Image (cartoon, helix red, strand yellow):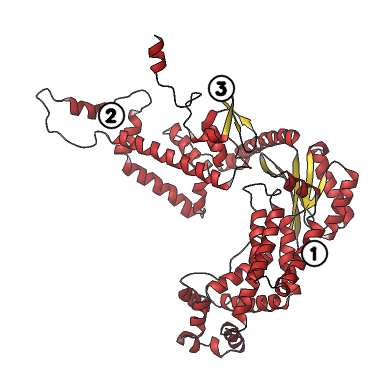
Amino acid sequence: MSSSASSKPKRKNAPGNRSDPGWEHGTEIDGAQKKVKCKYCGVTRGGGVYRLKHHLAGTRNNVEPCLQVPDEIKEEFRALLEKQVEEANNKKRKMNDIGDEDDYSGISRHGYNKKTRGAMDSFVTRKGGSVQTTLNKKYKRGEREEVCQQIARFFYTSGIPFNVVNNPEFPIMIHMVGKFGIGLKPPSYHEIRVKFLNKEVENVMKMLDEYKEEWKKTGCTIMSDGWSDRKKRSICNFLVNSPKGTVFLSSIDTSEISKTADKVLEMLDAIVEKVGEENVVQIVTDNAANYKAAGLRLMEKRPKLFWTPCAAHCIDLMLEDLDKKISIHGVTITKARKITTYIYSRTLLHCWMKEFTKDRELIRPAVTRFATSYLTLRCLNEQKGPLLALFASDKWKGSKFCKSVEGKNVQRIVLDTKGFWPGIITCLRAALPLVKVLRMVDSDENSVMGFIYEAMTRAKDQIKENFNHVEKNYKPLWDIIDERWEAQMQRPLHATAYYLNP
């Protein structure tokens, strides 16, 4: 008895026989309840190693993503899970394809043999299988085409963006419609506009209650985001961030409000009161003088929370200072704007440009205004050859554009290979390391507070290297960076996060 028990193979995830790669990154806390602790963020959750792998990969499949896992580990587990899904799909596909061949050779006078029995068995209901699923795949391919065509037609005639099909709610909707079956009466205009809208508001409020419970456990960050449209109407949105995620809290129309420090303080204080002072760790705003004054006064009034200026806004102001304080940057960006404005305001010339650049554009929108300017310089640099070819072509020389004063000025800028184009290279050497940091701090993927100090140090080192360690070339750039950085980003929470980052 004992020898047979010892020879019995252990299950894959039994203690002492854990070959799953997920166990290298987690520790079992409670085997009976399948609770595993992540080695990176220290959070313990149920679901065993399977859910731990989704936690590390950041799939959000019934588990929140790990915010501390290294990128290479995250990508490794994403690839592993994708491979497992593909293998499972292939296995299902093979099971469903059994017996598809119309092979009648070797049939006995009784009408079947072992081979045909195996073929028929694939259409017999078994545990974990479904007759209807197999028949649908085999015989309803044409009907699926008609249904999908009608769904696509609904998208086309309603002007719905195609990427809506990537919304996770879309396949759930289709599945529930199919599950209901024939005879589903679609929702009416009134139901969508009133009944179900009210129900969805209730659902969102319930979800918000879950976030509020998380705020009590871990604390949260209040973020303000103000903007104005072309008619000078302004609005200020308030969002709340926690390890569970970011949620929109409220919005204030500030068009008729004078944004003095007193008024800003009043708005921020009201939001803190709404969230609960005991739940707020910090409040993040932009770096304008009125917000800075209001933030400092708010910390005096509520000493348990911190005011922190926005890191993305700080870096954008550095890029603005490069444009304003270093002449070659200002001159080069002005010339680049003349080129893009001239080309994009003339339809025919824009078509010619895309013909030469093989449909590549010259303007690349970015997260901020001044980052857009430098990314446009990079696009121009990448398309230097096609632009030179365009303004030297017979098309250009024979056009009315070539004869106009403005056209001649733009042509002169583009063909200036000793001034304009080297100026672009100089600007990019200074700005692109900062744009890289800007992209990092504006990302929603991971918390970057513990990394931003090192990222800025690396950006400065990269700028120094780009200018071959010649101090007179990189020192003015460093001075601009340090002036903004030391005044705005030397904050207690940033320093603490950097110090505690393992």
Q: Residue at x 55, y 34 (%)?
A: 52
- From the top left corner, tell me how far across and down residue 155 is, in percent: 48, 51
- Of the image marks 2 and 3, the number of the one nearer the N terminus: 3
Do the CB atoms of the residues marked 2 and 3 lie less than 8 Å apart?
no
Q: Which residue is mark 2?
A: 122
Amino acid at circle 1: Glu
Q: Residue at x 57, y 33 (%)?
A: 26
Which quadrant of the rendered structure holds the N terminus? top left
Which quadrant of the rendered structure holds the C terminus? top right
Q: Secondary structure at mark 2?
A: loop
Q: Residue at x 81, y 48 (%)?
A: 492
Q: Which residue is mark 3?
A: 31
Near-viewer residue (350 or 296): 296
- From the top left corner, tell me how far across and down residue 162 is, in percent: 49, 53
Crowding near the residue tagged with mark 3, few <14, some 14–19, many ≥20 C-alpha atoms within 10 Å: few
Q: Which residue is mark 1?
A: 483
Amino acid at circle 2: Ser
Relative to 5, say whether 38 is above or below.
Answer: below
- From the top left corner, tell me how far across and down residue 48 is, in percent: 54, 28
- From the top left corner, tell me how far across and down residue 261 is, in percent: 88, 56
Taking the image as drawn, is residue 257 in sight? no
Q: Secondary structure at mark 1?
A: helix
Q: Work out how far the residue at label 2 is from the one at label 3, CA to CA, in angstroms.
A: 38 Å
Q: Nearer the viewer, mark 1 or mark 2?
A: 1
- Of the image marks 1 and 3, the number of the one nearer the N terminus: 3
